[in-house]
């Protein structure tokens, strides 16, 4: 049993997105139905649309930064009622019993995570369809509560960009006394500047875009470095405790590794489709680490939303209509966005 709803998706990597009907399952006892109000556009949506990782299944409906209003709840649901604001991020299911799941690390589920789009859908068959659509049905456990004090459109990007940077910043102890470098000022990077600053770190931004240097300071960075200028890069040689690398395309990580202090870590969250090369001496000298992090668990996502509410952190967004999604994806590909597109899903009705 299921309901047909309108969505925006694509039939192939080289096709523009278009309106298409999809189905949402009828509510199971622990399900919540959400009318989607806003959905952010993450670079991962673009990677998947273009099949950059060779993992896309078509038709593909992207969108995993979903904020909306609860329109129905299953009989066993206790944390949500009709009318509540709610959110869905990257993860909509996991086994719930393996060690990572029991330790709130659903993103590392040993049986494999079900993502909000492009994952096998155990209820309806086929693949899960994402937030570029009118509604979503998700299990209560994987549904987030939205703090009332955050603007829902500007908070949508927190559901992926926010948790993806909050989790490693917390894990690697970004805070007072630490120099934290953010590489790339895009959707993830600009939220990372705000969160790292709120955590108390000394924040330095590394950008390839001269025109973003002023913005870096407005967003809360203490210092901004044009990473294409070797003289500016030298100022931070062996001085940075943690680097959060949000770059979406292939780039040289070695020039950044050389900025790390003893025991410093470069944490990759960006997903360049091609392998990156690491020069041995850049990690051996200074006992440095090259590491990575993938989104975050459900409990930590809720914690991040509360943290952002407390510090009034949201994204800088360009709110667009559903019929502007293709143009927005082209601009995202050209690194022309300040700093996250969010789709007003009411324009799909
Ligand atoms: P975005 O908004 O496009 O930002 C990426 C930034 O990287 C750009 O603003 C640009 O910053 C920099 N950049 C782009 N191309 C570059 C190049 N060729 N060389 C150097 N710098 C370049 O993307 P996003 O949505 O923040 O996502 C960033 C990456 O994280 C994507 O690969 C995405 O798939 C990935 N991601 C990973 C996770 C995870 O869990 N690990 C979660 C979400 C997203 P400047 O102009 O400042 O240089
Ligand atoms: Zn994402």
Image (spheres, grey):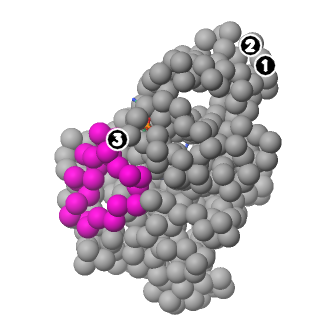
Q: Residues within 10 Å of mark 1 (few under 14, many from 20)?
A: some
Image: magenta residue range: 317-340
- Marks 3 and 2: which is nearer the front? 3
Contact? badges 3 and 1 (CB < 8 Å): no
User: Residue 33: within the magenta?
Assistant: no
Residue 287: which disc?
1
58 with respect to 26 (left or right): left
The residue that disc 2 covers is: 284
Contact? badges 1 and 2 (CB < 8 Å): yes
Against 63, residue 14 (above or below) is: above
Q: CA distance from mark 3 to mark 1?
A: 34 Å
Sequence-first disc among 3 and 2: 2
- Whether label 1 lies within 8 Å of ligand 1 gets the answer no
Q: CA distance from mark 3 to mark 2?
A: 34 Å
* Res. 146 image quadrant: bottom right
The residue that disc 3 covers is: 335
Instruction: Give the x, y percent position of residue 309.
Output: 63, 70
Q: In this rendering, does residue 164 appear at all?
A: no
């Amino acid at each position: 049993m299921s309901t047909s709803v309108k969505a925006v998706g694509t039939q192939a990597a080289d096709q523009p997105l278009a309106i298409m009907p999809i189905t949402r399952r009828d509510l199971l006892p622990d399900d919540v139905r959400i009318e989607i109000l806003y959905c952010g556009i993450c670079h991962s949506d673009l990677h998947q649309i273009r099949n950059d990782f060779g993992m896309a299944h078509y038709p593909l409906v992207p969108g995993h930064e979903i904020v909306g209003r609860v329109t129905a709840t299953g009989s066993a649901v206790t944390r949500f009622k009709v009318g509540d604001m709610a959110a869905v991020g990257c993860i909509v299911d996991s086994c719930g019993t393996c060690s990572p799941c029991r330790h709130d690390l659903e993103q590392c589920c040993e049986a494999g995570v079900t993502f909000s789009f492009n994952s096998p859908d155990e209820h309806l068959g086929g693949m899960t369809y994402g937030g570029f659509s009118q509604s979503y049905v998700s299990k209560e456990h994987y549904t987030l509560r939205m703090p009332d004090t955050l603007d829902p459109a500007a908070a949508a990007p927190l559901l992926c960009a926010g948790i993806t940077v909050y989790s490693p910043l917390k894990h690697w102890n970004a805070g007072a006394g630490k120099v934290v470098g953010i590489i790339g000022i895009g959707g993830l990077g600009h939220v990372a500047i705000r969160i790292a600053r709120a955590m108390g770190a000394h924040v330095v931004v590394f950008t390839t875009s001269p025109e973003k240097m002023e913005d870096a300071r407005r967003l809360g960075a203490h210092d901004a470095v044009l990473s294409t200028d070797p003289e500016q890069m030298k100022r931070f040689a062996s001085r940075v405790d943690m680097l959060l690398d949000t770059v979406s395309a292939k780039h040289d990580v070695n020039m950044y590794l050389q900025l790390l202090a003893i025991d410093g870590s470069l944490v990759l969250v960006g997903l360049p489709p091609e392998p990156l090369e690491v020069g041995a001496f850049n990690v051996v000298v200074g006992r440095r680490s090259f590491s990575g992090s993938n989104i975050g668990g459900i409990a930590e996502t809720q914690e991040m939303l509360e943290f952002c509410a407390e510090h009034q952190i949201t994204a800088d967004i360009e709110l667009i209509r559903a019929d502007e999604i293709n143009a927005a994806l082209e601009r995202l590909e050209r690194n022309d966005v300040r700093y996250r597109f969010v789709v007003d899903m009411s324009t799909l009705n």
